[in-house]
Image: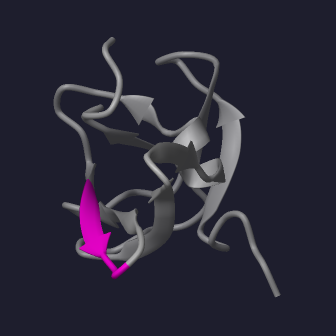
Amino acid sequence: MYKPLPDSVTIKTSKVNGLGLFAREGIGQGTNLGMTHIKLNGDIIRTPLGGFINHANESNCVKVELKADKYKKWNLVTIRNIKEGEELTLQYTFYNI
């Protein structure tokens, strides 16, 4: 069954910009939260994780690139422990801010 967000993450109003991703519970360092983007036929498509994560220069997550024969995809991985209620952030690399 498709789930757009992992159980540990929700979407709420962000102090950074608009809506953002927030931890519903503590999330450990190194947790793979799922796919944020996929590149098909030259187009980069965002998933709900990629569409709602906000930028921060000192982020708490990174995008990890995974390559397959016909496409690329990027997963969101935490780079430190995340506290319940904390916003998940990422340094943007696909978009200018």
Q: How is the image coloured?
A: one colour
Give me the residue at 72% from left, 64% from top.
4
Horizontally, residue 19 falls left or right of residue 33, namely: right
Quarter occupied by the N terminus:
bottom right
**Looking at the image, residue 86 lies above or below residue 10:** above
Main secondary structure type of the part rendered in magenta: strand
Residue 66 colored magenta? Answer: yes
Residue visible at 67% across and 73% down in the picture: 7
Viewer-side residue, 71 vs 64:
71
Q: Nearer the viewer, residue 64 or 28?
A: 64
- Quadrant containing the C terminus is top left
Tell me: residue 20, above or below residue 81.
above
Q: In the depicted view, which residue is nearer to us: 32 or 8? A: 32
Q: Residue 11: which quarter of the image?
A: top right
Q: Which residues are magenta?
A: 63-69
Q: Is residue 35 magenta?
A: no
Residue in the foreground of this view, choosing between 90 and 36: 36
* Residue extending furthest toward the top: 97
Q: Is residue 94 visible?
A: yes
Image mark count: 0
Inspect this view and state whether residue 86 appears. no
Residue 73 vs 86, above or below: the answer is: below
Residue 75: x and y in percent read: 38, 66
Which residue occupies 32% across, 74% down? 28
The residue furthest right is 1
Q: Position of residue 48 (x, y in %)?
A: 65, 50
- At x 25%, y 64%, the residue is 64
Q: Where 82 sits versus 43, above or below?
A: below
Q: Find residue 3 and report its horizontal and vertical position in percent.
A: 75, 74
